[in-house]
Amino acid sequence: MLLQQLVYFSKVAEYQNVTRASEVLFVSQPTLSRTIRQLEEELGCALFERKGKSLTLTESGQLLLDRSNEIISLLQRTQNDLQDLNLAETPRITIQLRCIAGLFYDIIPGFIREHPEIELEILQNDNIGIDHNHFDLFLYPADAPLNEPDAFNLLREKIYIGMAKDHPLAGIEKLQRKDLASYPFIDVAKNRYFKKISEQLWDKNLSRKELLIHSDDIGAIRRMVVRHGYLAEIPEFTLTPEEQSGMVLRQLEDVEMHRYIILSDNTARPVSRYAALFKDYLISSLVRRGILTQN
């Protein structure tokens, strides 16, 4: 029996639905269903009663859930105790960063000044799907706030239409969706998190834009906007002020485009005290800036 199996089982028990649990865990539904079946085979008992898509814990399942919670809690305490015994080692926080890079890199120098003993590892591989063995905290976008125990709704981020300062639309203060019709867009690649949010926004609110180029590099998107007259969707906190040089960001007047930024712990392993320190610092920084979402 593996710890990851217990974490997956606990989430399915919490939501009583494999589909919802798979979304929270960022794993595929077949993978999660297979893990539960393997766990039941290994233990020799049914853990859930299945009624359509709804799952209810059996007596054996409830016992395993109680013990799983004890095991995860014990691992958390053990990890903290081991960190105390190994103070000579440099403590590290690994963060999966899928959004708000412009804002994030403006915040972390203050944390380093307060905690110079802590090393930060920031991973920005934005492909959908994550390695649960290699992060402490996860920052990612969603199209709506999440009401999950392991998810903190950090902020609501506007999505602008980005264009060069000399673009024909740059002088229009009250930009509307009809104004975009005759201009080409450069869009994020299909394997990016933002692509999923973007498609939902356009499907719900807008006519389909003219897409000629897809890219997974925000730097390349910025260059095509500034140098070659393309339009692009630019989230509010993605670029630093320096990176926005040469660009104009306009909100659409007739439809509101935004996304929500979520901070999650790694549900596959206990949260270290160092990760908890950074989480508190990040939230406090957003409070000071007046942009924290009310959870």
Image (cartoon, grey):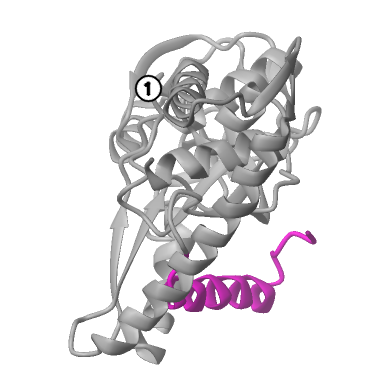
Q: Mark 1 points at which residue?
A: 189
Quadrant (top left, top right, bottom left, bottom right) of the C terminus? bottom right
Nearest the eye: 127 or 212? 127
User: Would residue 178 appear left or right of 184 to someone viewing this image?
Assistant: right
| Residue 208 in picture, x, y percent from top left | 61, 8
Binning the other alpha carbons within 10 Å of mark 1 as few (below 14), some (14 to 19) or many (20 upward) gives: some
Instruction: Using the image as rendered, state which of residue 123 and residue 288 is in the foreground.
Output: 123
Q: Can residue 29 be seen in this view?
A: yes
Kindly identify the residue that appears in the image at 42 percent across and 83 percent down. 110
Residue projecting furthest to the front: 44
- Residue 35 position by quadrant: top left
Q: Does the segment drawn in magenta span residue 194?
A: no
> Residue drawn 46% across and 15% down?
184
x 44%, y 70%: residue: 275
Residue span colored magenta = 271-295
The spot of residue 27 in percent (x, y) is 46, 29
Q: Is 71 situated above or below 116? A: above
Q: Which amino acid does label 1 sit on?
A: Ala
